[in-house]
Image: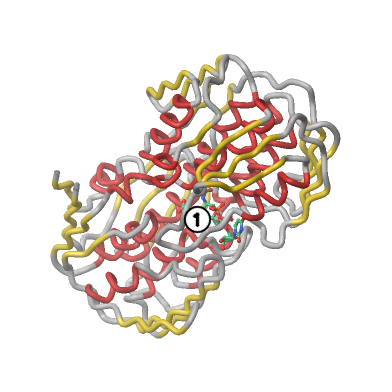
Amino acid sequence: MDKIEITGGIRLHGEVTISGAKNAVLPIMTAAILSSGENIIKNVPNLRDVMTMGKLLAHLGFGFHLEDNQVLLQTQKVTSIEAPYDFVKTMRASVLVLGPLLARSGKARVSLPGGCAIGARPINLHIKGLEKMGAKITLSEGYIEATAKQLKGAAIYFDIPTVTGTENLMMAAALAKGTTLIENAACEPEVVDLANALISMGADIQGAGTSIIKITGVNKLRPLDYTVIPDRIETATFIAAAAITHGDIKINKCRPEHLEAVINKMKEAGVKITQKNDKLIIKGPERLSSIDIKTMPHPGFPTDMQAQFMAMMAIADGTSLITENIFENRFMHIAELKRMGADLQVEGSTATVKGVKTLTGAPVMATDLRASASLVVAALAAQGITVIDRVYHLDRGYERIENKLSLLGAKIRRIK
Ligand code: EPZ
């Protein structure tokens, strides 16, 4: 397993370019299942998760090719309707083939994802929605077995705004008979990007980005030719890296409008942020001010930035309260940050972060994608050397992070 070694205490400076959004490209790749032909997706980040999704689609019978940040998907023929446990256990987003397979082939056999480091992460709302659209769904031997001769439009209400639940049902509804209404839908920018991709294929979708999405089924969709939005969480992670190192960086090819909650909180913490079209200029303060955050569905503060923000607050001036409202176990980074000298206490879903003068480098272990990003952010500011183990977590969601950080002056190297 690769490790990453970081020597902290260096102020980041220079420019970084943001890659395509992982959580947009994964559902957009499964949207290609809805058409038969040559699909091309651009601005695709070269990530482990993209390769995993590509292998899963190849398993279903599709041609998959990733080169120069473009994905080619030949979807003329479906030869399997099964998403095996081996794929789903390594990447939960594999469940995104469920809706499109049902819409295209009328059946799907998808392994239940099982839990992951940050929580149980059930998919009961995906299943309930598809049943409302006429799918027959049974669970056997850890697999979801779904059939639907013809999906039909339905009114669906989500108890919780689920991102991939909204995406699965939007894709299923695109070819259903009649109109589907999704209420309490997720409003994340990645949901909007999927909707725009589907619309570019000929789907009839209104309201994406709001909590009520209306999809009117069509008979056929044409293949994709679509460019994915930049990754807002990668952008926010680089803001955190500049903020914690008293750095001065320019972030290119980003979408500040996808990050209003994060940018507001960063400014409250003393980070100077100026925006010019698709660029952000970030100046980190001498010392960060401690502020409280609560993670919420978009447009609230994103749960995917909670761990990175906690790393910043660990050396801020004062005490911060960080409340995680989305996942029940997304505090795995706390034990590792404590090894670096952070003063953290957890009470239920709230962590109390008492700012310390400085963190110290230590051998630490990544447990999940954003926890590993938080350890990188902390290591950049810590005195001394930090070695992060199990960085395959990091490679799932960050394209060439050590190259991008070393271009910003960080002292970072990958140990094979
Ligand atoms: C998506 O996961 C993202 N993944 C996650 O990013 C992100 O953290 C999450 O949305 C929240 O923003 C992708 O887009 C591939 P949810 P998802 O369904 O869709 C509960 C990362 O780091 N729920 O919006 O799985 C669930 O348990 C990853 O890139 C149900 O109870 O999240 C959670 O508490 C991590 N039943 C809440 O809803 C369901 O059927 C939100 O989950 C579905 C969800």
Q: Specify the quarter for ligand 1.
A: bottom right
Q: Which kind of residue does numbered mark 1 sit on?
A: Thr
345 or 108: which is nearer to us? 108
* Image coords of residue 241 (percent x, y): 34, 59
Q: Residue at x 23, y 47 (%)?
A: 406
In the displayed structure, 191 sits above or below 269; it is above
Q: Residue at x 67, y 48 (%)?
A: 166
**Mark 1 sits on what residue?**
274
* Image coords of residue 258 (percent x, y): 58, 51
Could you tell me if residue 242 is visible in this image?
no
Q: Residue furthest front?
A: 141
In the displayed structure, 221 sits above or below 293; it is above
180 or 44: which is nearer to us? 180
Q: How is the image coloured?
A: secondary structure
Q: Which residue lies furthest to the right in this view?
A: 178
Could you tell me if residue 191 is visible in this image?
yes
Q: Which residue is drawn at 28% across and 55% down?
A: 12
Label 1: few (<14), some (14–19) or many (≥20) C-alpha neighbours in 10 Å: few
Q: Residue at x 22, y 73 (%)?
A: 340
